[in-house]
Image (cartoon, grey):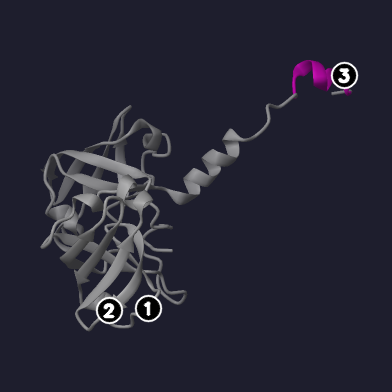
Amino acid sequence: MFTGIIEEIGTIQQIKSSPQAMELSIQATLVLQDVKLGDSIAVNGVCLTVTSFTKTMFTVDVMPETVKASNIHSLKNGDSVNLERAMAANGRFGGHFVSGHIDGVAKILRKRPVANAVYVDLAVPRELLQNCLMKGSITLDGTSLTIFDVTEDTLTVSLIPLTYKDTVLGMKRAGDFVNVETDLIGKYIAKNLSQRQPSNLSKDFLRQHGF
């Protein structure tokens, strides 16, 4: 489990690719301070397992489903990535519940400065938008953000100066793709409601039973 509060920006040092899977070696500092084999680190919002590490680098495997569902497959040597360690039980919960399981990708349509913020408009698949609402939470490349506008096929988020500077979202431009994880609690509620049986409650039913 993660919070969507990015701890540092890492750099892709090496990529080993097979037809469906990948192995990434990522240069980092902060997230390696207490790292152990098997630890979870979110890379651009994707929960990945540490398979080896040094003082300056760690390696993770990326499985076929993750390659297919995320923007990980487009990474190149030298690219920057958002990094966050799994949430500690005694830490502050600064963002929202983030699982690190990507729902899909969105395309940046435009970025526009508004006062001290930068608004980002994104084209989002409609099956993901059904779990998005005004002032709700969303994770883009692992960054916890608030939705400020939703249409039939787009949404808008606002980046404060710190988020713009300290995450890869500040580096991305129109046409780039970001990983999307919609709100975890919202997905569970939507799933539960969709599986509920139709109610037999009606005026005739109530009348027959003395109401």
Going by the numbered disc 3, the residue's amino acid type is: Gln
Q: Quadrant of residue 175?
A: top left
Numbered circle sitting on residue 76: none
Q: Is residue 134 left or right of residue 119?
A: right
The residue at 26%/40% (across/down) is 106
The residue at 38%/62% (across/down) is 3
Q: CB atoms at circles 1 and 3 under 8 Å apart?
A: no
Q: CB atoms at circles 3 and 2 under 8 Å apart?
A: no
* First in sequence: mark 1 vs mark 2: 1
Q: Can residue 162 be seen at all in this image of the molecule? A: no
Q: Quadrant of residue 125?
A: top left
Residue 83: within the magenta? Answer: no
Kindly state the secondary structure of the residue where label 3 is placed.
Answer: helix
Quarter of the image containing the N terminus?
Answer: bottom left
The part of the chain drawn in magenta is 201-209
* First in sequence: mark 3 vs mark 2: 2
- The x and y percentages for residue 5 are 31, 63
